[in-house]
Image (tube, rainbow, N blue to C red):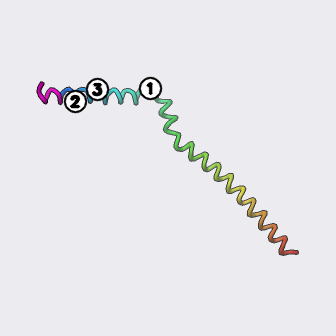
Amino acid sequence: MDINILRQIGVVLGSIAFLAICWWAFSPKRKQRFDEDAKLPFADEQESTEKGAQKSESRSDDKDGAKQEQEQGQDK
C-alpha cells in the first residue's frame, strides 16, 4: 500500500464523517430539540431576573419600614 492510498482513504472517511454529522445536525427530526436547547441560556436569565426583582422588592420594603421606624423614633 502506498502512502497516497492511505491519504485517500482518510479523506474519504473524513468526508463521510463530516456529511454524517451535517445530516444529523440539520435533520428535521431534531429541529424542535435544538430550538429548545438554543433557548436554555435565556431561560436561566429570566429566572435570575425574576428572583432579583423579588429580592429588590423585599429589600425596598425593609428599607421603608426601617426609615419609618427611625422617623417615629425621632418624633418621640
CA gap, disc 1 and disc 2: 28 Å
Residue 28 numbered mark, or none: 1
- Counting other residues with Cα less than 10 Å from the Cα at mark 2, is it few (<14), some (14-19), or many (20 or more)? few
Q: Which image quarter: residue 26?
A: top left
Identify which amino acid the numbered label 1 is placed on: Pro
Q: How many numbered discs, if any?
A: 3
Q: Of label 1 and label 2, which has the lower sequence position?
A: 2
Image quadrant in which the C terminus is located: bottom right
- Mark 1 element type: helix
The residue at the point 25 percent across, 27 percent down is: 13
SS for callout 3: helix
- The answer to whether 48 appears left or right of 65 in the picture is left
Identify the amino acid type marked 2: Val
> Residue 59, image x and y in percent?
71, 59
Which sits earlier in the primary sequence, circle 3 or circle 2?
2
Residue drawn at (64%, 48%), measured in percent from left and top? Answer: 50
Residue 1 placement (x, y as % from top left): 12, 24
Which residues make up the magenta segment? 1-7
* Front residue (pair 2, 12): 2
